[in-house]
Image (cartoon, helix red, strand yellow):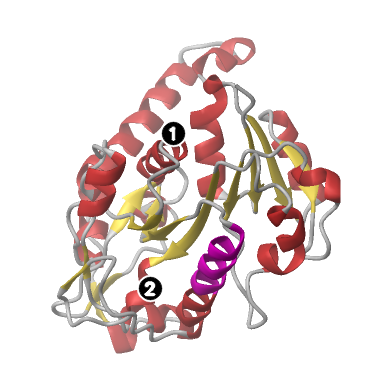
Amino acid sequence: MHKKLFCFGFGYTAKALAARLAGEGWRIIGTTMSPEKADAMRAIGVAPVVWRGDALDEAALEDATAILISTPPSDAGCPALLSAQGLIAATRDRLKWIGYLSTNGVYGDHGGAWVDEDSALKATSARARRRIVAEEAWAEFCRRHNLPLAIFRLPGIYGPGRSALDAVRNGVAKRINKPGQVFNRMHVDDIAAGLAASLHAPEQQGVYNFADDEPAPQQNVVAYACQLLSVEPTPLTEIEDAGLSEAAMGFYADNKRVSNRRMKSALEIELKYPTYREGLSNILNASSAYQSCGASLSSSAKSDCV
């Protein structure tokens, strides 16, 4: 069966999904604003399309059977929808799946209470409010054109090269003290597994929270990373003394626990990394195994490690 995934935006999550689909016969196309990144995409078997939010070439979506959107919306709306809605509507006869990556920031602050997909959207940041508008625009567009849509509200994303371990190693990790504050997060490989499960069950449409099983304080995650690296935990810093950016302060304005029950039941997902402890431990072990392998081989043979 012909399988072609077009990705509006090809970032960390889309790359993980592409890697997961590589052995299933999928052809992957992704947009990038950078010609340099286009070369890196070709190197991993992804066909690049240089696109800066302007009109998309009609040939780009030719034969696409699935579309993933991860481009952030502006005040004007979602750039993918604004630039390509006509082309997308024209694919309705062959398009099996549209996945929109949103954020669980749309829920805003719920005082630490649990939220699910039916909870009130009380976004506190402009970024999250733009996501609500984009979600609604995609939902209305897909209803009008009878197109399949799944919306994924993502938490903090971490994985190799992007985790508390990297922050500790780079000397930028802060343990922010805000009593009662918790966040959800999710390993990028579990996110990719969830997106792949949705691709394989396109009839399961609607909104899905993606999240791990254990909402936890940020300082606990950093402390565990320090423990894994056998270094002293960084000292607790009061939030008002942490020198956080306006965007980061907005992030700490929200306090909620995100339920992943619908994700697990409808998409039949079992998390490989249900908490940050399994996720960080795996990242460290994989990194250590690679370094050990590389140290024991000549430079000409190191490619066998990956």
Q: Nearer the viewer, mark 2 or mark 1?
A: 1
Front in this rendered view, residue 230 or 128: 128
Point out residue 221 in the picture as x, y percentages from the top left corner.
24, 57
* In magenta segment, residue 282: no
Q: Is residue 297 left or right of residue 40?
A: left
Task: Write down the residue under mark 1.
Answer: 200
Q: Nearer the viewer, residue 99 or 168?
A: 99
Of labels 2 and 1, earlier in sequence is 2
Residue 136 shown in magenta: yes
Label 2 CA crowd tier, 10 Å (few <14, some 14–19, many 20+) = many
The answer to whether the residues at label 2 and label 1 have Cβ atoms under 8 Å apart is: no
Measuring from the top left, give residue 265's x and y in whole percent: 22, 44
| Residue 239 left/right relative to 102 | left
- Looking at the image, which is closer to me, 203 or 174? 203
User: Which quadrant holds residue 174?
Assistant: bottom left
Q: Report, in whole angstroms, how far the alpha carbon at label 2 lies from the one at label 1.
A: 27 Å
- Give residue 105's mark: 2
The magenta segment is: 134-145
Q: Amino acid at mark 1?
A: His
57 relative to 294 in the view: left or right? right
Residue at x 67%, y 65% (from the top left corner): 81
